[in-house]
Image (tube, rainbow, N blue to C red):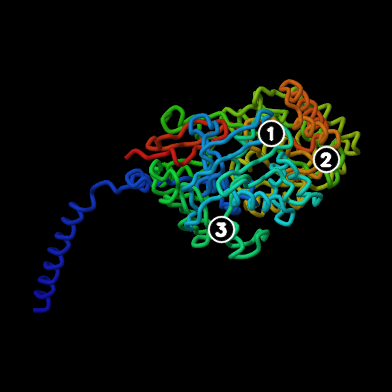
Amino acid sequence: MKLQKLMHSLARRGILLALLGTLLIFTGCGPVETRVEQGNREQVLHLANGTEPESIDPHIVTGVPEHNIITAVTEGLVSEDPKDLHPVPGMAERWDISEDASVYTFYLRQGAKWTNGDPVTAHDFIRSFKRILTPELAGEYAYMLFLMKGAEAFHNGKLDFSEVGAKALDDHTLEITLENAVPYFLSLLNHYTWFPVHTATIEQHGGLYDRSNPWTKPGKFVGNGPFKLKEWRLNDVLIVEKNADYWDADNVKLQGIHFYPMESAETQDRAFRAGRLHNTYEMIPAKIEQYQKESPELIHVDPYLGSYFYRINTTKKPFDDVRVRRALAMAIDRESIVKNVTRGGQMAANYFTPPQTAGYTTRARIAPGIEAAKQLLAEAGYPDGEGFPKTSIIFNTSENHRAIASAIQEMWRKHLNIEVQLNNQEWKVYLDTQRGLDYFISRAGWIGDYVDPNSFLDMWTSWSQQNQTGWSSKEYDQLIARAGATREVEARLELFQQAEEILMAEAPIIPIYIYTRVYLLDPGVKGWYPTILDHHPYKHLYLEP
């Protein structure tokens, strides 16, 4: 009897399992929609963004990952054309320029709003300029505003802010007076340093000059861009959604953007192939050729106005000796690095400023040469590397940075008989270490903020907080200052030539190569053009299902 009941029970279970299997056949065998496919259908862009952003406060950050987010949630006086990045109206619907090109008058849009409903006014820009120029904030890009009349004097405590060349003529008219005519000024305004912040919100959540103020968190952040901050899960994702109150909202097609802080190129590649990302922030060099052969529609190798280099802390021995710095720079085989390590069409460079930057190509060089490098090292007191102290290279987390550092480590060991350690650091720690001059050698990259040699050369002045090497030169400072006051094109470029020759001779940095932008992009992303600064204004992007 028990056996019969058991057989009936199993039979009933078999029928149920068969029915369940039938249901699964009809409901589960179709292809599962990927995150990218869903995003294409819903106009939600999924972007790899390299690393967890340090902040989205435009006045205290310096990195590209931060830029990518800030430009979604904040807008300056001008915006960028998506194809060639020439300045187009942003918060200002138009502007006038004086005959001598030293006074700009901007007419702000009457209907522009912050995400809390407040109108965007000329006074917001004035308060924002004062904030970043105030030394208490320690904004590393404050020097970028020094071309405004009186700005540097105010920053140095020698002038009241009322005398700075930034005036609100009324609620919607802003006048900016420059120390001298600046040919790239309108393009410069696209840098987030010049973006407005809602100072009342900052003061509501803490001090106006407190770098740890939590005003940038979801539920607190107030912006004026085409998107607004929705969610920020640290080390997971930062989400922005379309800002319905943005002045040009009718022309913004994307409904949202998800920024993922992925540092690993391998992780990005897997996520892209699995349909979880619309792009990769970088690529595994060993896979570049494979993608070019098998999936050329996915891979992009674009020109990129940037220089990859190493900073040297000139305040620490033995790097206070220019002979040591030059010896290290001369012993690097840059051609081998771009051919065997990076593999993305980069240009080996023993100079800093990328060629043909607004008509400027430097004649300065750090000449390679192993024997000459050995001789310099011996003259500095380290014959054949004997007695050379322990030192290290720091770099932010990335397989590519590690591979380059490993190659250079081996070159120095082989040619100069010196040993250096490799020190991988998380992005924020790496930035703090570099700022505090608590390093020997630091991996670095610089992408032009605008297309002009000044963007690459003024950062090595004594007044620039981007310098972070401990090195300075009065002659270099004077040349850059004179270039800023010179309107004649050829004379201005010649001053840059002389300055870069000093930079290469003193070698507080070791240039390695000129960037290309190598990445994967889903074909469904439209309105994305190869631009020299790798800017892709989000308001012009859309997704094709």
Question: Residue type at mark 3?
Answer: Thr
Name the quarter where the C terminus is drawn: top left
Q: Please provide percent x and percent y for residue 11.
A: 11, 67
Q: Nearer the viewer, mark 3 or mark 1?
A: 1
Q: Nearer the viewer, mark 2 or mark 1?
A: 1
Q: Is residue 214 above or below residue 417?
A: below
Q: Residue furthest front?
A: 170
For the residues labelled 3 and 1, say whether their Cβ atoms are less than 8 Å apart: no
Residue 29 visible from this viewpoint: yes
- Which residue appears at 63% of the width and 41% of the height? 175
Q: Secondary structure under badge 3?
A: helix
Residue 102's mark? Answer: 1
Q: Secondary structure under badge 1?
A: loop
- Left or right of 244, for residue 478: right
Residue 216's mark? Answer: 3
Dividing the picture into quadrants, the one containing residue 7 is: bottom left
Residue 376's mark? Answer: none
Q: Nearer the viewer, residue 483 or 35?
A: 483
* Pointer 1 local density, CA inside 10 Å: few below 14, some 14–19, many at least 20: some
Q: Nearer the viewer, mark 3 or mark 2?
A: 3
Question: Residue type at mark 2?
Answer: Ser
Please report whichever mark, 2 or 1, sits nearer to the chain's N-terminal start: 1
Residue 472's mark? Answer: 2
- Which residue appears at 46% of the width and 48% of the height? 111
